Image (cartoon, helix red, strand yellow):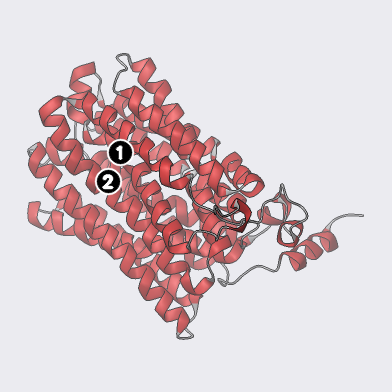
Amino acid sequence: MQQHPSTRRPTSATWIVVLMSASVLINYIDRGNLAVVGPQFMASLNLPEDRFGLLGSAFFVTYVLAMIPAGWLSDRYGAKPVLAVGVAIWSLATLLTGYAGAFAAIFALRLLLGIGESVAFPATSKMMAGQLDVAHAGTANGAIAFGYMVGPAIGVAAGTVLLTRYGWRSTFITFGGLSLLWLIPWLMIRVHEPVLAHREDPAAADAPGYREILAQRGLWGASLGHFASNYNFYFILFWLPSYLESQRGFSPAKMGAIAVGAYIINALSAFGAGVATDRWVKRGGSPTLAYKSLMGLNHLFSIFCMAGLVLLPERLAIACLYAYEVVMGVSSPGVFAISQVLAGPTATGRWVGIQNALGNVAGIFAPYITGLMIVMGHGRYEGGFAVAALVNVLGLVGWLWILPRIEPIDWRAARRGLRAVSPE
C-alpha cells in the first residue's frame, strides 16, 4: 500500500547537505567556464582584456542585484523551490552561451546566469539554518565550501579537455546540459521549513523584519569581511588561468594542472576546517574564537600570498598560490556558518541575501578593474595583484573588529530595542 505523502519521513539532513554541496559545485563550474576558455574565447571573438573583464563583471551585476530578492523568496516560500528554479535558470543560461555568437548575446546570458545563481547561498543557508544546530554548522558549511571550491577544479580539468578537443563552445553546452540533471534528486526531497508564507508556524510568526536585520552590527561586519574574501577569490578564479598562460608562459595543460591542484587543496582545507571547528565547539570551545581566528588568519596570510604570486620566481609563486588556497579554504566555512548562527532559521535567507549581495560587489570590481589595470600596464599583472593584497585589510576590520560575539541573536529583544530608540 502506498504511503500518503504527508506521512512520509523527511529527507535526512546528510543527503540534503550532499545535494546542496553538489548544487554549489555546479554553480561554480558554470560561472567559471568563461575563465577556463579565456584566451581561446578572446581570440575567437577578437576581444581585448577589458571587454573580457566586462563579461566577468556582468555576471555579478545581476548576481548582486538579485541576491536580496532571492533571500526574501527563500524565507517566504522555502529553499527547496527557490533553489530548483535558480538551478534551471543558470543551467539554461550556460547551455545557450555555447550557441551565442555575438558579444551582446553573451553579455545578456551572463546577466541571466547571475540571476539564476543568486539563489544558491541564501537558499542553502536558509535550509541549513532550519535543519542543523550550531554544533554541526561547521561540517555542513565545510561540505558546501568543498562543493564550490572543488567545482572550479572540475571545471578547469574537464573544461580544458573539452576546450582543446572540441573548442570553447563545447564547454558551455556540456556543462549546461549536465547541470539540469541535478534537479531530478532535488525535487524528490522532503523537508519542513519555517517560511513567512505560513504565519501559523510559531517560528515563522516570530521572524524579524528587514529593519531588525539591518540594525545588526554583525551583518555589516560579516558583509565587509565577505567582500574582502570574495575579492581575492574572484580575482584568482577569473584571472589565474590567463595570468599563468600569458604572464608565466604556461601551456594550457600545465595551467590546468596547477589550477586543479590549487582548487583541490582549497576544497580539502575547507572541509577539514569545518569538521575541526565542529569538534572544537562540541568540546565546549568558543565559536567566536574559532571562527574569528580562521578569518583573520586568511586575510593576514593572503596579503603576502598575493604579493608572492606575482613577484617571486615560478616555484615560489606556485607555493604562494597553494598557501593562499589553504588559508582561504580554512576560513570558508565561517563565511556562512557565522551568519547562520547569528540569524537563525527564520532570518538566515534574508540575512545571507544582504550579506552575499554586499560581499559579491567584489565580483563586479575584481574582474573588470583587473582587466583595466592589465591594459594600462601593457599586459602586466602587478597592479591587479597589489589591489587584491590591499583589500585584505578590509577583511581584518570586518571579521575581527566590527563582528560581535558569534551567538544566536534574540530577535524579540532586538525588536524591543528598536522600539525603545524609535521616536514617538
Quadrant containing the N terminus in the rendered view: bottom right
Q: Quadrant of residue 194?
A: bottom right
- Bin the neighbour count of mark 2 within 10 Å (Cα to Cα): few under 14, some 14-19, many 20 and up: many
Q: Earlier in the sequence, mark 2 or mark 1?
A: 1
Q: Is residue 304 visible?
A: no
Q: Determine the residue located farthest toward the right in the rendered image.
A: 424
Residue 234's tag is none
Which amino acid type is marked by label 2?
Pro
3D distance between C-alphas at marks 2 and 1: 6 Å
Image quadrant occupied by the C terminus = bottom right
Structural crowding at the residue carrying mark 1, measured as other residues with C-alpha within 10 Å and reported as few (<14), some (14–19) or many (≥20):
many
**Residue 248 appears at what percent x and percent y?**
10, 42
- The answer to whether residue 379 is above or below residue 45 is below
Residue 257 percent location from the top left of the image? 12, 48
SS state under label 1 = helix
Three-letter amino acid code at the position of disc 1: Gly
The quadrant holding residue 340 is: bottom right
What residue is at 8 percent from the left and 44 percent from the top?
254
Could you tell me which secondary element the residue under label 2 belongs to?
helix
Mark 2 and mark 1 residues within 8 Å of each other at the beta carbon: yes
Residue 23 sits above or below residue 53 on the image: below
In the rendered image, which residue does mark 1 sit on?
32
Q: Which residue is mark 2?
A: 152
